[in-house]
Image (cartoon, helix red, strand yellow):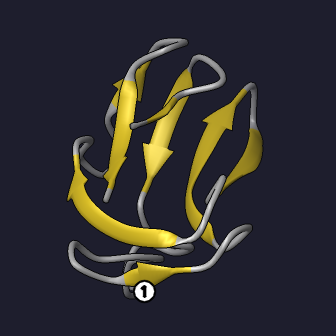
Amino acid sequence: ALTSPMVGTVYLSPEPKAKPFVQQGQNVKKNDVLLVIEAMKTFNEIKAPKSGVIKKIVVLNSQPVEFGDDLIIFE
């Protein structure tokens, strides 16, 4: 599982009406942007640590997260 490296708010798409960065079942490559976490008015891109398939997106859009919370489960 990919865990949160910081405390902040998760956003699953680059803009409110834009399509999400990734979807369940999607193949991703290492360093693809999966989501962003806003922390202290800064948007931090969270990238794939490895290539694989998105098994489950654990968090919801605009959800607050703590350090170490599960974000995405890889297969």
Q: Which residue is drawn at 47% across and 13% down?
A: 66
Crowd band around label 1 with a 10 angstrom C-alpha radius: few (<14), some (14–19), many (20+):
few
Q: Which residue is drawn at 41% across and 62% down?
A: 12
Residues 13 and 50: in front is 50
Amino acid residing under circle 1: Ala
Residue 36: image x %, image y %?
A: 60, 53
> Which of the 4 image quarters holds residue 63?
top left
Q: Is mark 1 on a helix, strand or loop?
A: loop
Q: Quadrant of the C terminus?
A: bottom left
Q: Is residue 65 left or right of residue 37?
A: left
Residue 5: image x %, image y %?
A: 65, 24
Instruction: State the count of labels.
Output: 1
Q: Residue at x 57, y 70 (%)?
A: 51
Q: Is residue 38 left or right of residue 43?
A: left
Residues 13 and 75: in front is 75
Residue 11: image x %, image y %?
A: 46, 54
Placement of 42 over or under 75, stated as above or below: above
Residues 39 and 32: in front is 32
Placement of 63 over or under 44, stated as above or below: above
Q: In this view, does 35 lie to the left or right of 56?
A: right
Residue 48: image x %, image y %?
A: 61, 59
Residue under pointer 1? 18
> Which of the 4 image quarters holds residue 7?
top right
Placement of 3 over or under 38, stated as above or below: above
Q: Residue at x 75, y 36 (%)?
A: 41
